[in-house]
Image: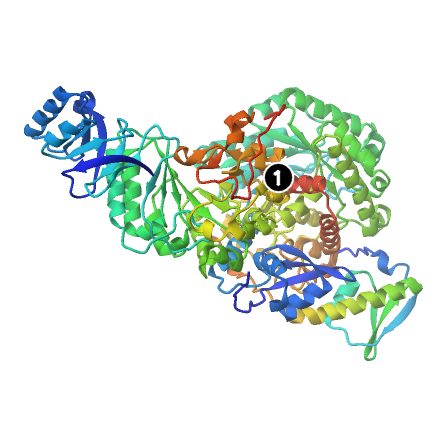
Amino acid sequence: MTNIDLIYSESFPAKVWVDINQPLSLAVQTELIHRGWKLRQLDVCFQAFCSATWSITAFNEILAHLLNDEIMRKKIPPNTPVLLNTFVATSE
Amino acid sequence: MSANYARGELLPFSFHRMDNNSVVAVSATGDYAFLTQQELATLVENPEKLELKKRAELQSKYFLKGASSFGSEELIRSRIAARKETVLAGQSLHIIVPTLQCEHSCQYCQVSRRLEDVGHTMTPTQIDAACVTIFQSPSSALTIEFQGGDPLLRFDLIQRAINLIQTINLVHKRRIRFVITSTLHQLTTEMCEYLRDNQVYLSTSLDGPAALHNKNRPLPTRDSHARTLSGIELARRIIGPHAVAALMTTTKASLAHPEAIVDEYVKNGFSEIFMRPLSLYGFAKRNIKHLGYTLPEFTNFYQKALQRVLEWNAKGTELREGTAALILNKLLSPFDAGYVDLQSPTGSGLAVLVYNYDGYVYPSDEARMLAETGDCSLRLGTIGDSLAELMTSPVMKQLVVTSISTQAAGCKTCAFNSYCGPDPVGAQAEFGEMSTTALLTEHCKRHKWLFEYFFHKLRTADDDFLDIAYRWAHPSGGSDA
Amino acid sequence: MRKVRVQTQGIEYRTVARVVSLESLSAQWQPELRFLVRAVDARAVTKIAQLRSAGLTNLILLTTNRDAAVQWQAETVLETADMLIDGDVVAVADHMNHAHVLFRYTDQHHTVFLTNRCNSYCLMCSQPPTKHDDSWLADEAVQVANHMASSPHTLGFSGGEPLLLGKHLRRVLDTFAHRHPSTRFDVLSNGRLLADSGDAKHLLHGLGERITWMVPLYGHADFLHDFVVQSPGAFEETLSGLLNLHRFGQPIQLRIVLIRPVLENLAGLCEFIGRNLPFIREVALMACEPIGFALANPELTDIDLREWSAELIGGLTTLKRAKVPAILMNAPLCALPQTLWPYAHKSISDWKRTFAEDCATCIVKTECAGLFSWHRQSRHAMKIQKIEGIINV
């Protein structure tokens, strides 16, 4: 098993832990990690590891979009899952 | 003109933010539309207020239903099925690894062994058994690709396989294509004559100009580049001008030379170049520090290389970039070009099988490389097992279950999930767990960047770029994985 | 369809017959067909009378001689001004003032008319539909197949809507396929009645690939298409019909008539075709015939294609990128930008084509589709401009 840290320039170099004052769904947490921010949980709220001022601003902007977009997505019907047995079954 | 229609219902779709004020929305068929924030809000909350031209566009791209929709629903089903042709039609790519022997000691290669090593070669019985399993695939087109090590070191086994497959095919009458992936350093005139007479293509590595290529692929004689070029020349002379395709691997050393690499391909008469990043899993940690590079470093390199490719095209030299062609096929064409990557469910096992020198069958090239590092969890079965046994193995089932993009965590809300699919083999390699959330994997980060990049390019594209994009997007008689 | 002025006697019911010279009769005669035998002089008239007495009762006298016609006691067709040609397949009856030429071998385009009923009411319909039962046309079509002495390269079926023939359509198609095995066929149909898979199977199963289905599509969303064809639900039915045609391996040509509401949305329509219907053999973009319903909706149908060059170029580029072949029909070359001339087809049927005065000295006249003969320069938007000077066609 290998750990690879592919870093998004958005979050690099990180120096400061910044408070996030709203609850984050698992999906948003994962998205932030996907984009390269380190997260940690402190009691009830999360913190993100950001760099100098530029990164804090960028982080707040992105977080705002992620949260609003998440609300928008809830109004859209989800895709019907593809039937699994179409692919698992085989014919001789 | 008034439009008398019942209020349309939303169909499933997702969107990806392009910037503060706009998104690209993608429907279940993979049709896309660029929307402003306002248009997105109107679509979701008050679709009856959409301006008529926008409404027509969004209906025709399956974001909204019309008054009745039974014909459109049939079309949606057939559009989605067309995207999955490669995984629905059966295994079309069969990779045979007759030996691990190779004279190189490339720093990034996970697999090869020195020439003197024995015990890393397939037996003739295993070759024969693999050929039987190949024809159990229902696919009407079969590509058989020989890899290694350097498979030319066991040319006898290659000939055995090709002759047997051709014999079996007298009955089956499938469309068959043979490819040998090799450095070409062992290529002889006799081999080329056999290849010509049996319509076998060659695929080789060309990492760039000599200094770069030789640095990446060291030989004691330090002339890998020259020997590869003379292999190419020999093959073209005897077999034909299109006998050889070339692939490159991007290493840390490559990053500084995007234009030179592209120019090298043009100089040597290739019409396709495939800018492939390095898969880092399978290496010892110290090697990663040494060889690895960040995503921004790769994307920066890629953009420059692609720019150079487009410049060559503008000057009248036909040159296609393989990664771009793969992505553009997903975005622009209703046809599945046959790449085994980016399928949902995964192409590993469903579209490709690897018959390895160690006697086992693997679902992909990466899976057999993973076994070389000690993780053998991705073996589907033994060479000689029937296709049905391989496909009903627990490993295969797990591969399928973890790679449905409309179900996997993170993927199901991703705008690109009709173009893409999780890579459970990659997840196993990176995290030791096939069901790892795709968002955390290298595979996802790289491909999300690529989709986003090409959507940006398409949004501002001029006619020349669009002509090239559609040309590359159209499947042209299949492609090698 | 071409009509030739004649006077008929002794033919009570509409009859299909083949025109033949007396010399050729013996080679062609068959008991189940009817023949219009040409008599050039009195001797010929006598000979034909003899043949009839001998039992060849399926012969009808064809003459230009009024006296001979008066003396003849049995069925006669008297040609007055225009002439019929040997090989013509005609329908004649006493109550008709004309012989309807249902098939003439020397024509460039051949069409067999199957019904005047239709289930759509297109804004620009050139053959406005009627409602009465005209199923006798299906039987007549079978008769035409039987009476054609030669097999043309291509033959088209149209109406109205041919699918309204129900099961009789297959009978007509099979008869033509059997009698004329080397001919390729076109069927002009909206495809709506093929939406049902069961009906589609009945009609299409085992049909082979010699028929091309020419199906109109006027929009990429239901409200656009349904508006042009004035029938709610038509779009979805046509899409389903197209998929069924494809399922049964039937070649399809999409027909797009270039009226205003279609041109305004041409970009979206071509993109829709490229992404959703890439199996289409060909797309035909057609300039509108100024006849029929089109005259009632001039604000939508009377178009000068010159004003829509950008839309035409855009649509054809989209189709080219999607690798869907396309052609332009019924448009004179002077109305198109030169970059689109390679797409232009000479497609107006001989019997309805004409040229304007100005065309006489146009250097590309021989390559041009020309105009519909009911085109009036002063009344229509599309103006003719002859092309002069050096052009690379």
Seen from the viewer's position, the closer of residues B22 and B158 is: B22
Q: Which residue is mark 1?
A: B479
Label 1 is placed on what type of residue?
Answer: Ser
Q: Is residue A58 visible?
A: yes
In the rendering, at what x and y percent does residue C210 appear?
A: 38, 37
Colour mapping: rainbow
Seen from the viewer's position, the closer of residues B43 and C292 is: C292
Residue sitting at the far bottom: A44
In the rendering, at what x and y percent does residue C93 appear?
A: 20, 41
Q: Quadrant of the N terminus of chain C?
A: top left
Residue ID at (26%, 34%): C89
Q: Secondary structure at mark 1?
A: loop
Seen from the viewer's position, the closer of residues C60 and A57 is: C60
Number of other residues with Cα within 10 Å of mark 1, as a class: few under 14, some 14 to 19, many 20 or more: few
From this view, report whether residue B427 is shown above or below residue B299.
below
All told, the count of numbered labels is 1
Q: Is residue B359 visible?
A: no
Specify whether B223 is left or right of C28: right
Residue ID at (71%, 34%): B319
In the rendering, at what x and y percent does residue B182 appear?
A: 69, 33
Seen from the viewer's position, the closer of residues B25 and C392 is: C392
Q: Chain of mark 1?
A: B
In the rendering, at what x and y percent does residue B357 appear?
A: 63, 41
From this view, report whether residue B127 is shown above or below residue B43.
above
Residue ID at (21%, 35%): C17
Specify whether A78 is left or right of C47: right
User: Where, by quadrant of the figure, is residue B427 drawn?
Assistant: bottom right
User: Where, by quadrant of the figure, is residue B113 drawn?
Assistant: top right
Specify whether C50 is left or right of B379: left
Q: Quadrant of the C terminus of chain C?
A: top right
Residue ID at (46%, 49%): C295
